[in-house]
Image (cartoon, helix red, strand yellow):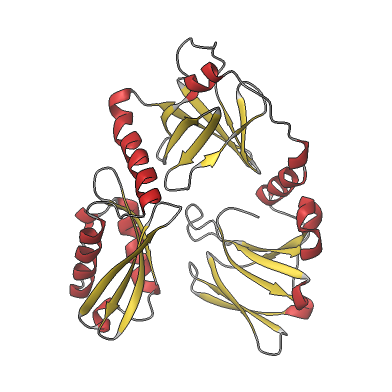
């Protein structure tokens, strides 16, 4: 797949899988693609990719007509509807570079050989690293297993291919500088992802502490299934502001405030029209770190996911 795939559907009685490469966090209003896969060859990486279909910005939802002959696609970013004849899909076999790279990496995943790395070296890699204008990267050691957590994404195991190169997922590796066992810490890491190299610098202990504390708190909350302190209050304040038509930029960071404005355009029914708030029920802590609530109003309800940052501000949210 490409970056940040969102919609997915199945065609031809299960013989094909179609998914949108939405790249919703980075592409802006640039046109995107659907990728068409041979379902019988999913495990074969590149051999499964039949090609791509050009679409609009942020392909968001797909549906198939009752007679199974027509595919409907909404493009949220470009505000367009595409109607495709399933029997004559305009498939382009020339693949974008990121899809080819991801598929090739998947096909060769069985060729990767995990090695054993000295625990003292692994310990020197642990810490918090900051990407330029992007999320923080938390590297931790659980026993003899190194893990990585990028921003709001779930924690993942990273597998050593050498003393310095670790495999995170298809198309993505993490490279550490060479250090001797027990002789200090790495000062940076390099993220290799689909042809891009991103250097993240190690934070000092004081700057890293809020991220480490948040990571420890999340692990405890996930185990005990308890919401983050302040998340319900922040959500209620957000709802109150939306009902008044005055979202508060001080309640959230800049990215989430921009996302809120986009979300307000998407919602079929403005929150103000749902009537008075009747109840808020905490349901779970999701594996991605969100506190998930079911919010009931006089005339409808919302499923609400909210992520709070170390500063108590809303880092991300979703609602439906």
State whether residue 222 is above or below residue 50. Answer: above
Q: Tell me which corner region of the image, top left, top right, bottom left or bottom right, holds residue 93.
A: bottom right
What residue is rendered at 74% in x and 63% in y? 37
Answer left or right for 313 relative to 265: left
Q: Give the quarter of the image for residue 134.
A: top left
Where is residue 121 drawn, in percent x and y?
A: 54, 18
Q: Is residue 63 left or right of residue 247?
A: right
Q: Residue at x 49, y 52 (%)?
A: 26
Q: Position of residue 264 (x, y in %)?
A: 33, 71
Point 60% across, 22% down: residue: 164
Residue 22 is left or right of residue 206, and the answer is right
Question: Which quadrant does the N terminus fall into?
Answer: bottom right
Q: Residue furthest bottom?
A: 67
* Vertical order, 214 against 238 (above or below): above
Q: Is 294 drawn above or below residue 107 in the view shown?
A: below
- The residue most toward the front is 224
Give the quadrant of the C terminus. Answer: bottom left
Residue 53 is situated, as x and y percent measured from the top left of the image, at 69, 66
Side (left or right) of 318 relative to 182: left
Name the foreground residue: 223 vs 44. 223
Residue visible at 24% across and 51% down in the picture: 229
Q: Quadrant of residue 301?
A: bottom left
Image position, residue 144 (x, y; %): 55, 27
Above or below, 127 against 107 in this view is: above
Total labels: the figure holds 0
In front: 121, or 223?
Answer: 223
């Amino acid at each position: 797949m490409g970056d940040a795939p969102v919609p997915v559907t199945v065609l031809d009685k299960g013989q094909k899988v179609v998914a949108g490469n939405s790249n919703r966090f980075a592409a802006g209003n640039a046109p995107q693609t659907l990728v068409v896969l041979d379902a019988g060859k999913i495990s074969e990486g590149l051999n499964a990719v039949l090609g791509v279909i050009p679409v609009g910005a942020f392909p968001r939802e797909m549906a198939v007509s009752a007679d199974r002959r027509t595919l409907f696609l909404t493009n949220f970013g470009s505000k367009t509807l595409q109607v495709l004849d399933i029997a004559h899909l305009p498939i382009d076999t020339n693949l974008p570079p990121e899809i080819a790279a991801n598929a090739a990496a998947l096909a060769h995943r069985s060729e990767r050989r995990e090695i054993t790395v000295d625990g003292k070296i692994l310990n020197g890699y642990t810490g918090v690293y900051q990407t330029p204008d992007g999320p923080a990267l938390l590297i931790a050691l659980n026993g003899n297993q190194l893990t990585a957590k990028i921003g709001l994404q779930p924690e993942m195991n990273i597998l050593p291919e050498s003393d310095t190169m670790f495999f995170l997922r298809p198309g993505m590796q993490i490279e550490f500088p060479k250090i001797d066992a027990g002789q200090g810490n790495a000062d940076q890491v390099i993220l290799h992802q689909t042809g891009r190299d991103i250097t993240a610098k190690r934070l000092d202990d004081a700057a890293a502490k809020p991220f480490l504390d948040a990571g420890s708190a999340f692990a405890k909350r996930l185990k005990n299934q308890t919401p983050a302190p302040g998340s319900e209050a922040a959500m209620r304040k957000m709802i109150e502001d939306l009902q008044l038509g005055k979202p508060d930029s001080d309640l959230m960071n800049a990215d989430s405030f921009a996302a809120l404005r986009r979300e307000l355009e998407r919602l079929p029914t403005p929150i103000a029209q749902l009537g008075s708030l009747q109840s808020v029920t905490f349901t779970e802590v999701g594996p991605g770190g969100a506190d998930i609530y079911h919010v009931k109003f006089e005339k409808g309800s919302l499923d609400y996911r909210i992520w709070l940052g170390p500063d108590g501000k809303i880092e991300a949210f979703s609602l439906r």
